[in-house]
Image: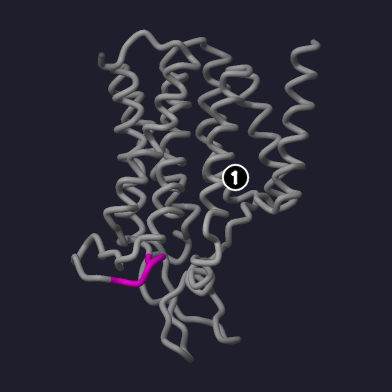
Amino acid sequence: MIEISAYVVLLIIASVAGYRVRSLSLSGAIFTFITGCLVGLGFGWRGLFILGVFFASSSFWSKYKKHKKSKLDEILQKGDQRDWVQVVANGSIASIAAVLFFVTKADVWMIAFVVAVAAANSDTWASEIGVLSKRKPFYILTGKKVEKGTSGAVSLLGTAASFMGAFFIAIVAYEVFSMDSLFYLILITFCGFFGSVVDTILGATVQVRYSCKTCGLLTEKTEHCGKETHLSKGIKWCNNDVVNITSIIIATIIAVFIVGVL
């Protein structure tokens, strides 16, 4: 009982702190607390530690050299303050895996949890670090150079950051959960990284993008230059949050399948 109370107090402090430093909106803070409770239910301090590492590192890179990312505000639908939708998109699969582990005690759900976090971290590091590249990224479908922040764009720096984001979570989980095989370290790293690759492909093919009628800018926003933008490409309901959760689901399913087969 004392342990549970300590977890709850810790989650409240973390959620409030995230809100105070503007890494989370009010709704984001509330859903972060809920996500933390579910993860704590399944994995105790180990799961909360990994979740905390993801949140802390993501918040750090979101704030890092923020002044150089100001131009992205014109393109991206949301800023660096996560709302409840973003928290659900990045943390719901990990939460479900935690609950399934609590019910079944099957190690496959522990791997699923870590892969889900690794995929989310991989994509976040790619986005937040990749835009700091001195060179313009190229569009994954055509190879042509595009503006930074464009969905489906990749760069050498962003790709390296994506891989390291997945590896970072994998190595932390490997130690925290005392895994007995390097196979899991490799599996988590590559499945997490693959999730980011899927995110990029979906961003280039089906993610919605609008065009400003006034300045012609391609953006995720439904309004720009004080006027409503019009659909340029992609599926209207398939925004960045949908792409994020879809890529995490795919990465997690692949990992669960591999573990199940082996």
Residue 72: give x, y in percent of width and height.
Answer: 49, 69
Q: Is 115 in front, or is 10?
A: 10
Q: Does the magenta portion include 158?
A: no
Question: What residue is drawn where x is 45% and y is 16%?
Answer: 175
Q: Is 145 in front, or is 222?
A: 145
Up the image or down, 149 lies above or below 53; here it is: below
Quadrant the N terminus occupies: top right
Q: How is the image coloured?
A: one colour
Up the image or down, 185 lies above or below 136; here it is: above
Q: Does the magenta portion include 149?
A: yes
Q: Is 94 in front, or is 57?
A: 57
Up the image or down, 121 lies above or below 259; here it is: below
Q: What type is the residue that disc 1 sits on? A: Val
Q: Is residue 83 left or right of residue 113?
A: right
Residue at the far left in the pictured view: 143
- Name the magenta segment's main secondary structure: loop
Q: Magenta segment range?
A: 146-150
Residue 174: give x, y in percent of width and height.
Answer: 42, 18
Question: What residue is drawn where x is 24% and y is 60%?
Answer: 140
Under circle 1, the secondary element is: helix
Quadrant the C terminus occupies: top left
Q: How many marks?
A: 1
Residue, disc 1 = 87
Q: Is residue 104 left or right of residue 26?
A: left
Mark 1 Cα shell of 10 Å, populated few (<14), some (14-19), many (≥20): many
Residue 189: give x, y in percent of width and height.
Answer: 33, 31
Residue 59: give x, y in percent of width and height.
Answer: 58, 47
Q: Is residue 44 left or right of residue 119?
A: right
Q: Is residue 202 visible?
A: yes
Question: What residue is drawn where x is 50% and y is 34%?
Answer: 93
Question: What residue is drawn where x is 46% and y is 89%?
Answer: 213
Q: Is residue 110 left or right of residue 36?
A: left
